[in-house]
Amino acid sequence: MKIELTEQQYRYLLDLVYIGNWVINSTREDDRIKEYDQVESLVFSHCLQRRMRSLVELYHGELIPSRAFADGGIHEAIEHYEDIVFYEILAEELALRDMDGEPLTGENYRALMERIDTYLSEFDRHGTDHVNVDLEE
């Protein structure tokens, strides 16, 4: 397979591949999915021919994204995504909890969405400062 990319498109592809592998493998310890690491290594290996050598380094015989790449802002994008997803999931879970186990129907869907929006507005204003958990039960 051959894919033609501009330098800028290739640079975007590096970000996408890194983020994809991060999502799949970053929480794994001994059970990394090596096939994704191999694809990442293959895609990053083309940095050597594209005047992007600083974005790749050799580690235990494998080409990996360099520290310069990892420290270059990609983790801020990942953290932004994680923050948004965290608050959206928390809002949805709290709204569902507020429904007292009532199954989701066409009739209560609007109420659920309004409750989610209320939680999201609260989180926008105060983060988790007003979230309380009773651990003594």
Image (cartoon, helix red, strand yellow):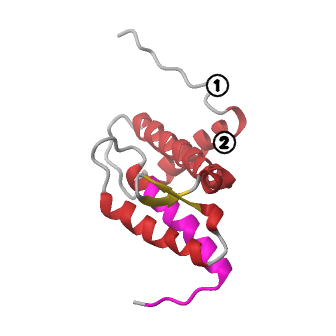
The local secondary structure at tag 1 comes to: loop
Residue farthest left in this picture: 31
The structure residue drawn at horizontal position 31% and vertical position 58%, both measured from the top left corner, is: 34
- Residue 109 quadrant: bottom left
Give the quarter of the figure containing the N terminus: bottom left
Q: Which residues are magenta?
A: 2-22
Up-down relation of residue 45 to residue 9 (above or below): above
- Mark 2: which amino acid? Ser
Earlier-in-chain disc, 1 versus 2: 2
Crowdedness near tag 2: few (<14), some (14–19) or many (≥20) residues, C-alpha within 10 Å: few
Residue that label 2 marks = 121
The structure residue drawn at horizontal position 66% and vertical position 80%, both measured from the top left corner, is: 7
Q: Looking at the rendered structure, which numbered label has been put on residue 7?
A: none
Residue 59 on image: x %, y %: 46, 53
Crowdedness near tag 1: few (<14), some (14–19) or many (≥20) residues, C-alpha within 10 Å: few
The local secondary structure at tag 2 comes to: helix
Marks 1 & 2, CB-CB < 8 Å contact: no
- Quick one: 76 or 96, which is closer to the camera? 76
Is 134 situated left or right of 32 in this image? right
Up-down relation of residue 100 to residue 117 (above or below): above
Q: Is residue 76 magenta?
A: no
Residue that label 1 marks = 129
- Mark 1: which amino acid? Asp
Q: Is residue 21 magenta?
A: yes
- Residue 37 quadrant: bottom left
- Quick one: 85 or 109, which is closer to the camera? 85
